[in-house]
Image (cartoon, rainbow, N blue to C red):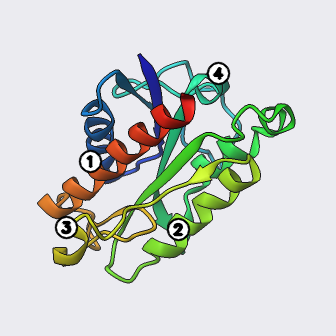
Amino acid sequence: MTDILVLYYSRYGNVAEMARYVGRGVESVKSCRALIRTVPAVSAVCESVAGDSPAEGPPFVSKDDLVRAAGIALGSPTRFGNMAAPLKYFLDGTGDIWLSNSLAGKPAAVFTSTSSLHGGQESTLLSMMLPLLHHGMIIMGVPYSEPALLSTRSGGTPYGASHMAGIENDIRVTEEEKQICMTLGARLAELSLKLKG
């Protein structure tokens, strides 16, 4: 099996739901498996060490998960047009992987959720691409051959999958957004297989 890492941070569950649909897309490709992982929250009050797994949901990511994956999808809610601090904190600690060039040449994709339609979806997606580019990864998005990109009235960009959750974070992922997430995951898995040879 070819492992594709779907790594995300989610506070209200919307990005976590998107990650599951990206994972479905990955697993729609023969011989590909989605490794869904998350990162712990960052405390502004004190430094504490989280266990290996949260109380519920997927386990926390390890650096080894990054290295062994054939491709990586990163997901984060938008924080002022940028990725959330917990995901950035994890990525900031991957200097040793950068030095070893372990991610160079692997494909990567990104996805996000915002409270408002124009709340920074594209800038957040772009912010998540930056560390991936520094790692030498090959960034891919969603082409307009995906019909849901042209029919969506909420999230969805060619830069990556996105979702509009509403100010109360209570708007569920739409059918178009689900389809875009699955397309993103399938494309990532297909490209990973091609590059793996």
Where residue 160 appears, as percent x and y from the top left, is 42, 62
- Label 4 or label 1, whichever comes before in sequence order: 4
Where residue 187 appears, as percent x and y from the top left, is 37, 47
Q: Residue 148 carries which label?
A: 3
CA gap between label 1 and label 2 equals 20 Å
**Crowding at mark 1 (Cα within 10 Å: few <14, some 14-19, many 20+):** many
- Label 4 or label 3, whichever comes before in sequence order: 4
- Label 2 or label 4, whichever comes before in sequence order: 4
| Residue receiving disc 2 | 124
Which quadrant holds the C terminus? top right
Foreground: disc 1 or disc 2:
1
Q: Which amino acid does label 4 sit on?
A: Asp
Q: Which amino acid does label 2 sit on?
A: Thr
Foreground pick, 38 / 170 = 38
Q: Can residue 39 be seen in this view?
A: no
CA gap between label 3 and label 1 equals 11 Å
